[in-house]
Image: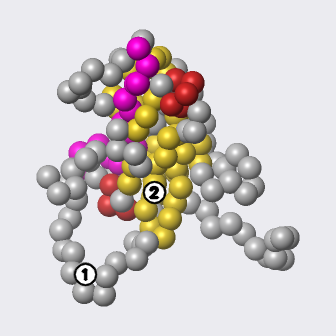
Amino acid sequence: MSKKKGWNRKWKKLEVLKLQKDLKTKELIYQNSAGYDIEAAEDVTIPSFKKGMAPTLIKTGIKAYMQDDEVLMLYNRSSNPKKKGLILANSVGVVDKDYYENPDNDGHIMFAFYNIKDEDTIVKKGDAIGQGIFQKYFVTDDDVAEGERVGGFGSTSK
């Protein structure tokens, strides 16, 4: 199927946080890709999983602006479990529109990983760790949400 004349992909704003000026600008790798590759903003050692331990957060150095009816879904790279032993603690990350510039962490997107290998895994700054996919969503007709986000990572319904 060919592109219609004048058709342009709707652009999203993936900002590199000011403290991470040396990170690459985020863009789709291939013209028909759904997901944006997201890299680690720093070197991180992820310990081998032990029962009861918290996941390791990997900072990305990015934040994402979205329209009112959009969400950014964070997915693991398909090669991470086999090659690095990394699985997402929450299976799929959900970044809401109001996470952007929240007062707790300015909307800094992070991935929460467990390492299922027997040895520690090292993630280097610049390593691709996951993908982000923007999606539209719907709300129920009788929705009357009035709350405002006042926290950052994992703050919804605290």
> On the picture, is 3 further left or further right than 51?
right
Left or right: where 150 falls relative to 91: left
Q: Image check: 10 left or right of 76?
A: right
- At 38% from the left edge and 54% from the top edge, which residue is drawn? 94
Q: Residue at x 52, y 23 (%)?
A: 84
Instruction: Establish if 7 lies above or below 84.
Output: below
Mark with earlier residue (1, 2): 2
Contact between labelled residues 2 and 1, with CB atoms less than 8 Å apart: no
The answer for how far apart the CA atoms under marks 1 and 2 are is 21 Å
State whether residue 59 appears in this view.
Answer: no
Mark 1 surroundings within 10 Å by alpha-carbon count, few (fewer than 14), some (14 through 19), many (20 or more)? few
For mark 2, does the 10 Å Cα neighbourhood hold few (<14), some (14 to 19), or many (20 or more) residues?
Answer: many
Q: Is residue 113 rendered magenta in the image?
A: yes
Secondary element at image label 1:
loop
- Identify which residue is drawn at 21% across, 81% down: 144
Q: Horizontal and vertical percent for residue 80?
A: 53, 31
Judge whether residue 72 can be spotted in this image.
yes
> Which residue position holds label 1?
143
Residue 44, horizontal then vertical, whole percent: 42, 20
Q: Amino acid at mark 2?
A: Leu
Q: Is residue 23 magenta?
A: no
Q: Quadrant of residue 89?
A: top left
- The answer to which of 114 and 125 lies nearer the viewer is 114
Which amino acid is tagged 1?
A: Asp
Residue 72, numbered label: 2
Q: Which residues are magenta?
A: 103-118
Quadrant of the drawing holding the N terminus? bottom right
In the rendered image, residue 24, in percent from the top left (x then y), is placed at 60, 36
Q: Position of residue 7 (x, y in %)?
A: 76, 74
Q: Left or right: 38 with respect to 106?
A: right
